[in-house]
Image (tube, rainbow, N blue to C red):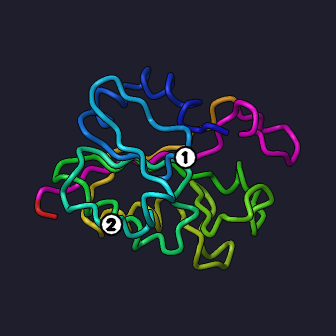
């Protein structure tokens, strides 16, 4: 599906490479679609490198940015994963996380119709109480407060639905060209 590559032009036009994705970074869950940036270097991290939830062996305060696209939903424990992703960020560095949106991608079905390995769902509208599952995160009620609690201030959080047809049937539009995701950018606080 190459979600990172699909978003490159949008990120460039939006200024993400100038504002957040610059310097030395790590792409957690990169697979074969590694983030490419114009000003800096990106280390890909995937299964052969170790558990993305723990980031064992990666020193604290190592990277200017931590980027992860469509990986957090596969982690066993979202809190532990985000704790370690923020841990390896330099103070002032940026956490840039992209996850599938529950309404658009999952079609409000659980378990996922399109990816049976999804362990968590994320939504900009649907709250945890509405789905009655502890492994569901509403953007404003759950995910953003968790990131703040772990020592990073959210600077941007938004739905990315470029090319998504809201009138189409229940198929995976991301297999083609559409985006059906949430993007959260947070900056690590100086004293964490």
Image-based side of 78 in relation to 93, left or right: right
Q: Nearer the viewer, residue 15 or 84?
A: 84
As drawn, is 37 to the left or to the right of 160?
Answer: left
Residue at image coords 79%, 45%:
172
Q: Which residue is mark 1?
A: 31
Mark sitting on residue 84: 2
Tell me: residue 169, above or below residue 141: above
Q: Residue extending furthest left?
A: 191
Magenta segment: 164-190
| 130 relative to 187, above or below | below
Q: Quadrant of the C terminus?
A: bottom left
Q: Residues within 10 Å of mark 1 (few under 14, many from 20)?
A: some
**Secondary element at tag 2:** helix
Label 2 or label 1, whichever lies nearer to me, is 1
Q: Specify the quadrant of the image occupied by residue 175.
A: top right
**Quadrant of the snapshot with the N terminus:** top right
Label tally: 2
Residue beneath the point at 27% across and 55% down? 153
Label 2 – label 1 distance at C-alpha = 19 Å
- For image coordinates 78% across by 64% down, the residue present is 109
Q: Is residue 19 above or below residue 106?
A: above
47 left or right of 192 in image:
right
């Amino acid at each position: 599906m190459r979600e990172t590559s699909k978003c490159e032009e949008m990120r460039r036009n939006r200024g993400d490479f100038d504002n957040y994705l610059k310097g030395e970074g790590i792409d957690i869950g990169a697979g074969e679609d590694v983030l490419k940036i114009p000003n800096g270097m990106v280390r890909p991290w995937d299964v052969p490198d170790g558990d993305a939830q723990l980031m064992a062996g990666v020193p604290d305060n190592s990277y200017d940015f931590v980027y992860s696209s469509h990986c957090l939903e596969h982690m066993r424990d979202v809190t532990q994963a985000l704790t370690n992703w923020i841990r390896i960020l330099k103070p002032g560095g940026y956490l840039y996380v992209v996850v599938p949106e529950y309404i658009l991608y999952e079609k409000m079905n659980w378990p996922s119709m399109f990816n049976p390995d999804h362990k968590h769902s994320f939504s900009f509208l649907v709250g945890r109480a509405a789905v009655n599952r502890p492994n569901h995160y509403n953007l404003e009620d759950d995910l953003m407060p968790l990131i703040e609690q772990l020592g990073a201030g959210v600077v941007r959080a938004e739905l990315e639905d470029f090319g998504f047809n809201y009138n189409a049937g229940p198929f995976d539009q991301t297999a083609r060209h559409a985006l059906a995701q949430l993007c959260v950018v947070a900056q690590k606080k100086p004293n964490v």
